[in-house]
Amino acid sequence: MAGLTFGAFVQGIAMTFFLFPHHISSGGAAGISIILNFLFQTPYAAALWALNAIMIFIAFKRLGKSSAAGTMFCVTVTAVTIHLFSPFVSEPLSHPAFDLTAGAVIFGTGLGILFRLGASSGGMDILALIISKWRGLKPGKTLFYINSSILLLTGLIVDVKTIFYAVACQWIAGKMIDMIGMISTEKLPILRLFVSANK
């Protein structure tokens, strides 16, 4: 549980301080949250939690009780983190390039820890699994189309530059996820601690 809490907390910190101030989407659910905040001033945390809660509820049978509960726990920790720290962020901390890089590295680290522990952070991967099963499509391709559509919509509504930012964010975060996935627990004691705690 400690590892899941830490990984989800790190994700929330990355979104709150580095990504959301520049309307940078780290994924499909985050993109929708950015759109809702931009158009209706809906709090990021509330939108993110509600979107994931709805998808997890719909996909409950596919995920199974244990997996669904774990995913909802991670989503809740991330949402609470965003809710608690958002009042302290009234404007971007730095230049978009710096915040993008720092945010993507931190976000990828948090997500990498969750993946390493076999957890899900929710998001559009749940919807992709549902559609893939329903239509008989490949989950990866389905997820790509969903995220790409949301990314394009976010760019058109908020700022076209956010499309480039989001692509860069996902690329950097993806590298961090892969890196953490390959790190030996012997070389990173803290990771060994989290893995052991979640067994």
Image: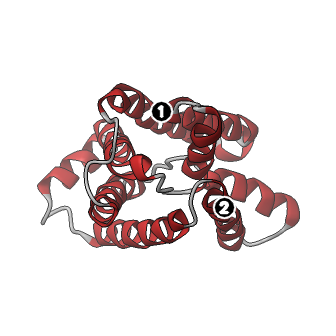
Q: At x 30% / y 58%, what residue is drawn?
A: 99
Q: Is residue 137 above or below residue 40?
A: below
Residue type at tag 2? Leu
Q: Is residue 169 above or below residue 55?
A: below
* Residue at position x 66%, y 54% in the image: 157
Q: Residue at x 70, y 64 (%)?
A: 149
Q: Are marks 2 and 1 in contact (CB under 8 Å)?
A: no
Disc number lying in front (2 or 1): 2
The residue carrying pointer 2 sits among few (fewer than 14), some (14 to 19) or many (20 or more) residues within 10 Å by Cα, namely: some
- Which residue is the site of mark 2? 156
Q: Earlier in the sequence, mark 2 or mark 1?
A: 1
Residue count near mark 1 (Cα–Cα under 10 Å), binned few <14, some 14–19, many ≥20: some
Quick one: SS at disc 1? Answer: helix
What residue would you read off at disc 1?
A: 73
The residue shown at (47%, 33%) is 73
The quarter of the image holding the C terminus is top left
**CA–CA distance in space, label 2 to label 1:** 32 Å
Tag 2, which secondary structure? Answer: helix
Along the viewing direction, whichever of 6 and 183 lies nearer the viewer? 6
Q: Amino acid at mark 1?
A: Phe
50 above or below 63? above
